[in-house]
Amino acid sequence: MTVARLKARPAVSPREREVSRQDPRSRPVRLKDPSAEVAREPARAAAEAVPVDRTLSAVSRHGLDAFAFFVANLQTGFGPFLAVYFSQAKWTQSDIGFALTVGSLVALLGQVPGGAFVDVVRSKRFAAAVAVIGISGSAFALAVWPSFPVVLLAMAVHSGASCVLTPAIAAISIGLVGRARAGERLGRNASFAALGNALGAAGMGAIGYYLSNGAVFYLTAALVVPTIIALSRIRAQEIDANVFKEPAAPAQAPAASGKDGIRALLTNRGLLCFSACMVLFFLANAAMLPLVGSVLTLRASETATALVAACIMVPQAVLAVSAPAVGRAAERFGRYPVLLLGFGALPVRGLMLAYTTNPYGLVAIQVLDGISASVLGVMVPLVVSDLTRGTGRFNLALGAVGTAMGVGAALSTSLAGIMADRLGSHSAFLGLAFMGFAAFMLVALIMPETRQPPEAA
């Protein structure tokens, strides 16, 4: 019997349907259409390949919350406390600068290898644990052996471990909740990280004041214990290791591996556009806070330290409050409008800083920095995840975008310093605002919407 004759078979009559209800054995037998079975095979295979149930247990959810919080605590020790610690140890400014430069160079060059390592390692928890232990060990080395060679090695280890830790957290988060809820989860991570930064800075500042600056690094090293405990609470069986290899949408390129996967990233127009936008954003953003600190020192020297601390705390508070809402908005309205909001706050901030003379007004303007930070903290991993769907190269791409951000930040402070010395701080802020506006326009003109339809997510 051919397929055409099967399709031409008359429909079941009302009488036959009535009889079949009374006696199931009398139901008419319909032969299966072989072509329909063949057509259903790819759909069935895709359904079996992608887990449908991504229920996240409360244990894993709270474990990831605590892990993001303690990782931020751990990283706080390597902030401004480094310069204070080195100065107390009678280091010269050139030695301090060289040690910090080593860390910056490793952080810049290690983004792509760090992301590639996380892609290769099947257990993202293992990658995160190795990075946490490396950061803790470098803090312990700084506290116990503050000699120049050990410090250089410790700075290199810390920066390299950080290049692994950031993509590992993103991979764990998206692997736990899936792509459809990634925005909300990344926003929650950013919120807990902001709380960790704020509380960590306050606690370490108090320890440095009442005990010693060296005690800050002992505390940083000890934070490895609660951080690892929090990581162990995340259940490995709930992390989907194949979430970044799920089939791509029809408009996207098919999955690739090895050199083909790297080549696919280099020819990914959306990823290249996003990287260019991030270079311009950090070219305008990175130098704003240091420039604000210099202006506050000149205008209110007696209270400059407290005001600078407030400039750091205000964005963290805004980030902690707004990041979850940013994640939900990205899932509801799309990535493009949320990116425009974050990029649009930057030139407005630069203009307001240029024309504000009140020191307390300069602090209040940092609310806009918190808005940009909350948007970028959520959107960078989210957009990269969208753009690399089906390639299995999410972490490698995230490292590449991180390198672009580092290049922009490194150039920003030098350019702003030259403008401030030759033209004054007012002109420097205007120049940064102009670059911020260029970043905003670049997003508006070339950045595509990357969110997938709900059925494709």
Image (cartoon, rainbow, N blue to C red):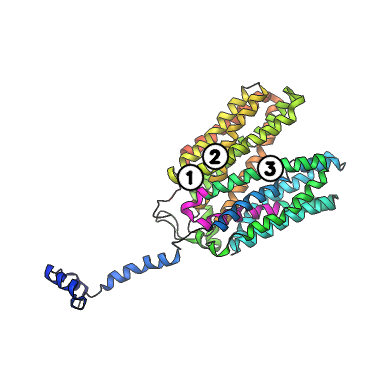
Q: Residue at 19% across / 70% down in the picture?
A: 7
Q: Report the label total.
A: 3
Percent of width and height locating residue 149:
83, 52
* Snapshot quadrant of residue 374: top right
Whether residues under marks 1 and 3 lie with C-beta atoms below 8 angstroms apart, the answer is no
Camera-nearest label, 3 or 2: 3
117 lies left or right of 330: right
Q: Distance between the residues labelled 1 and 3?
A: 25 Å
Region of the chain picked out in magenta, as a range = 159-184
Instruction: Reply above or below: 194 against 393.
Output: above
Q: Please, what is the three-letter code of the amino acid marked with disc 1?
A: Arg
- Mark seen at residue 6: none
Label 1 belongs to which residue? 328
The tag earlier along the polypeptide, 3 or 2, is 3
| Residue 373 visible in the shown view | no
For mark 2, does the 10 Å Cα neighbourhood hold few (<14), some (14 to 19), or many (20 or more) residues?
many
| Closer to us: 177 or 251 | 177
Q: In this view, does 217 lie above or below 47?
A: above
Q: Name the residue under label 3.
A: 199
Tell which circle, 1 or 3, labels the residue nearer the N-terminal end: 3
Considering the image in quadrants, where does the C terminus appear? bottom left
What kind of residue is marked 3?
Answer: Leu
Residue occupied by mark 2:
322
Q: How far apart are marks 2 and 1 (CA)?
A: 10 Å
Task: Look at the image and tell me whether residue 231 can be seen.
Answer: yes
Sequence-wise first label, 2 or 1: 2
- The residues tagged by marks 3 and 2 sit, at their Cα atoms, a distance apart of 18 Å
| Residue 133 spot, x, y in % from top left | 72, 58
Name the residue at 73% across, 43% down.
203
Of tags 1 and 3, which is closer to the observer? 3
